[in-house]
Image: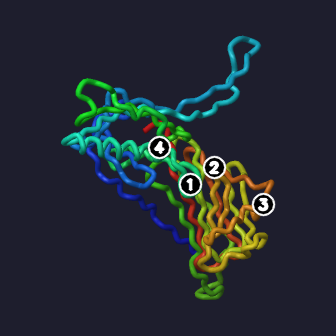
Amino acid sequence: MPIITAPVTSPEVPEVPPVEVPEVGFASITYVDPTGKRWPMTDLAAEWYTLAEGVSGLGAAPYELTADPHPRGGSRLRHVQPQARSIVWPLLVKGADHMAFTKNWRDLAGAFTRTLRPGPDGRPAPGWLEVARPDGSARRIAVYYSQGWDGQGRTAAGITWDSAVLTLWCEDPYWLDVHPQTVHRETGAGVDYLAPYPSVSSSQVLGATTVMNPGDVDVWPEWHITGPATSITFTRQDTGDAFTLDMEATSHGALLAGQTVTISTDPPQARSGTGENLVAGLNWPEAVLWSLPPGETPVVFQLNGAEAGSAVDLTYFPRYETA
């Protein structure tokens, strides 16, 4: 059975003037608020921009180490736990006159504090701090406003200009690539067994492949499956970890042509294209919704009941220690 692959596509990152930033170097930085509005942070010709002096928290993630005393002296490391990080972000705001400054000050305050308001799912939606490099690569981190939107109280401040030193809290300390990595496998049209000569093809296995994670730490991928299919199994060959979603064990039933299921590994979720919760169809307790470590990982995609049009898309965003 022929396997069709698709190239990886990447979204465009709008241009923002680059500047020298501590812990980062030469880069363009943009803040994206929870509504999706983009606020350039390094355009020195704009009415607000980051003050490079005082920026911190953009380097490697903080860790908590747990150790046990060793009988021969010293200690032995038992556990490493990444911790939430805080980013200190000084920002200058100005305006042509007092009212223009006041509008910019209020608008930016709302853009950051909006991260503390409930979103459509009832939870606060983060903003994103994006760091783009001259070569077109970019990384981002989810941020929540913590404190600091206060004027500095200096002489003449608060009329046409003022500065704030924000603290942004990041529940996930790792930076994400803005460009998703995608692996696509699709079942092609079948051929006659005897034409032009005897041949055997499989309608079950979409393929064994090697997935490359270019990041610094594990990623937890999302799987998008397009029917037809009766059950779906994904195996990580280096560890033997695997999970199966048996569609016929769910209220949905087998996936028909064009129907879809999305499986998220963190948090564990399985939902149909119409929003049905299918997580009970996973083969608990044996199911392991595995991650992809840095480097190459051999994996196998298997769809029972696959026909022409059946497809699997694995998507993940590489994660990094630094911006």
Nearer the observer, disc 3 or disc 1?
A: 3
**Mark linked to residue 211:** 1
Give whichever of discs 2 and 3 has the lower sequence position: 3
Quarter-wise, where is residue 187 in the image? bottom right
Q: Quadrant of the N terminus?
A: bottom right
**Amino acid type at mark 1:** Val
Is residue 281 placed above or below 190 in the rendered structure?
above
Q: Is residue 295 left or right of residue 229?
A: left
Give whichever of discs 1 and 2 has the lower sequence position: 1
Is residue 94 placed above or below 152 in the rendered structure?
below
Whether residue 1 is visible, yes or no, is: no
Which residue is under mark 2? 291
Which residue is under mark 3? 283
Mark 2: secondary structure: loop
Colouring scheme, one of rainbow, by chain, secondary structure, one colour: rainbow
Q: For marks 2 and 4, give the CA distance.
A: 20 Å
**Amino acid type at mark 2:** Ser
Q: Position of residue 282 (x, y in %)?
A: 75, 61
Nearer the observer, disc 2 or disc 4?
A: 4
Which residue is under mark 4? 141
Contact between labelled residues 4 and 2, with CB atoms less than 8 Å apart: no
Q: Position of residue 74 (x, y in %)?
A: 68, 13
